[in-house]
Image: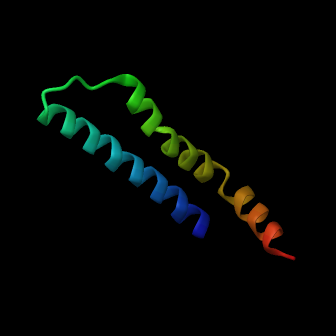
Amino acid sequence: MLVRFVAAALIGWTLVEITLYVLVARHNDAPVKVVPCIIRSLPMIAGLAMLVKARAVAEWVADKLDL
């Protein structure tokens, strides 16, 4: 459950970050560049990968926490 929450938080954070970037760029009459959008979308890709592999990631974390 925690892994899914972290993945959803990464996706939500990325959507907010990209939206704010576009809004600020439009407010300042500046062009929206592709490279900053790609860099800002990296946490969303990680979040999607975590959602797809949530069970494996949760087992890996549980194994790492077992000392």
Q: Compared with residue 23, is residue 35 higher up or lower down, i.e. above or below?
A: above
Q: Determine whether, in the image, residue 57 is placed left or right of residue 41.
A: right
- Indicate the position of residue 66 as horizontal and vertical percent values: 84, 75
- x 54%, y 41%: residue: 45
From the viewer's side, name the closer residue of 21 and 1: 21
- Indicate the position of residue 8 as horizontal and vertical percent values: 48, 57
- Indicate the position of residue 62 as horizontal and vertical percent values: 77, 70
- Indicate the position of residue 30 as horizontal and vertical percent values: 19, 26
Q: Determine whether, in the image, residue 26 is placed left or right of residue 5.
A: left
Q: Compared with residue 67, is residue 11 higher up or lower down, i.e. above or below?
A: above
- x 53%, y 56%: residue: 7
The structure's colour scheme is rainbow
Q: Compared with residue 38, is residue 1 higher up or lower down, i.e. above or below?
A: below
- x 37%, y 23%: residue: 34
Q: Compared with residue 13, is residue 44 higher up or lower down, i.e. above or below?
A: above
- x 27%, y 42%: residue: 19
Q: Determine whether, in the image, residue 17 is placed left or right of residue 63.
A: left
Could you tell me which quadrant the C terminus lies in?
bottom right
